[in-house]
Image: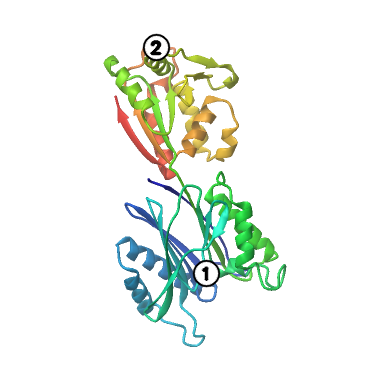
Amino acid sequence: MTIHLDIGISQLKKSGEELCGDTVEIQQTKDSNIIVLSDGLGSGVKANILSQITAKTASTMLKKRSKIEEVIETLAHTLPMCQARQLAYSTFTIAQVFSDGQVYLAEYDNPQAFWGHQGKVIPIPKRERVIGGKIIKESYFTAVDGDWVVIGSDGILHAGIGSIWNLGWGWDRVSKHLENTASKEKAAADWAGDITRLCSHLYGGKPGDDASVVVLKIRNPRRLTVLIGPPAQEEDDDKVVKKLIESPGEKIVCGGSTGNIVGRCMGFEVKVDLKSNDERVPPTGIIPGIDLVTEGTLTLVYAVELLTSDPEPTLLTNKKDGASRLAAKLLEADSIHFIVGTASNPAQKNPSYPSIFIYKQQIIKDLIQLLEKRQRKVTVEYY
């Protein structure tokens, strides 16, 4: 089983400081994501530098497959203890989440991470090891679809000290809050932002410490296959349609002629969805087994226009027109495979047709670039 990891980060800097003393670093390997949250000693510029060195060093070394012992020893030599205060140069939490759902945690003087499973925060099995004179808490567990892990700096737990709660928000209260607000539908970034907004409120709008939260949501990957345009060779029609209907995840067909080919090969008549009528965007079609059937180039142009404007996916989901629905499904997907037909369009030879129809291939390239900028995995094949 391969999982998808949705990562959300949100931070507050201590009131009166220009920089946050916490740093979050993310590195990707072929089979995992490495996330490091480091909390530098003190606050402001010095803390920021300390935490950056810690997070960057740890994440880079782990990406190069260094052992945790080597990471700790390197950090100990790079950033010694503060002799005056006898405090660590910076604390850290390391999370490595593998594509099969295996999770490794290494925690040093940071608050204990939260693991949500089936709606409840459950204990994370830990073992302690002394590495380079420092007590490191290590955990190994398996996360499945719907699970989440939340990592925070101590500024999250301290929220409310001297204001709402004398002893701060605290681990138990944060744990209950996470259980009450966890939602499979909410993106990790949105949830992380909600947590720090509440944290800021508990501080009375003036955080007494740097506060950072990293939300890791584990779910099954969302796959999407999009067929655009008829293949150059008519004998490839059946092959292309078979490839589409056998692909995992949701399926989209773009183009009137393409929709007719898919309908014919599947043995269905393409029906027009009159509910999707819009002043600018042509109506969508209906083919059983296909999640969305749209008109071709014009709908693609408007979808690119929507994606360029950086919309909220939830705002697009409720709209009925083909371009909004296409853009919403592209944003919802983690990986998108385009099957692009290269048959020439007779409309290109008609001078009365808008010139925009001539540039379909460029529009597809623009669409792919927009999706890749949003960290979607995109693959393309041409027929």
Q: Which quadrant holds residue 225?
A: top left
**CA separation in Å, label 2 and label 1:** 62 Å
C-beta proximity under 8 Å, tags 2 and 1: no
| Residue at the outermost bottom position | 84
> Which numbered mark, 2 or 1, is in the foreground of this view?
1
Label 1 amino acid?
A: Gly
Q: Is residue 205 visible?
A: no
* Helix, strand or loop status at disc 2: loop
Q: Residue at x 29, y 15 (%)?
A: 234
From the image, tell me which residue sits under label 2.
350
Q: Quadrant of the N terminus?
A: top left
Q: Is residue 101 above or below residue 87?
A: above
Q: Which residue is mark 1?
A: 21
Q: Is residue 14 positioned above or below 237 on the image?
A: below
Of residues 277 and 114, the one drawn nearer to the viewer in this rendering: 114
Q: Name the colouring of the figure.
A: rainbow
User: In this view of the protein, can residue 228 be seen by the observer?
Assistant: yes
Residue 300's label in the rendered image is: none
Q: Residues within 10 Å of mark 1 (few under 14, many from 20)?
A: many
Q: Residue at x 50, y 19 (%)?
A: 286
**In this picture, is 75 found above or below 378?**
below
Judge left or right: residue 121 versus residue 269. Answer: right
SS class, disc 1: loop
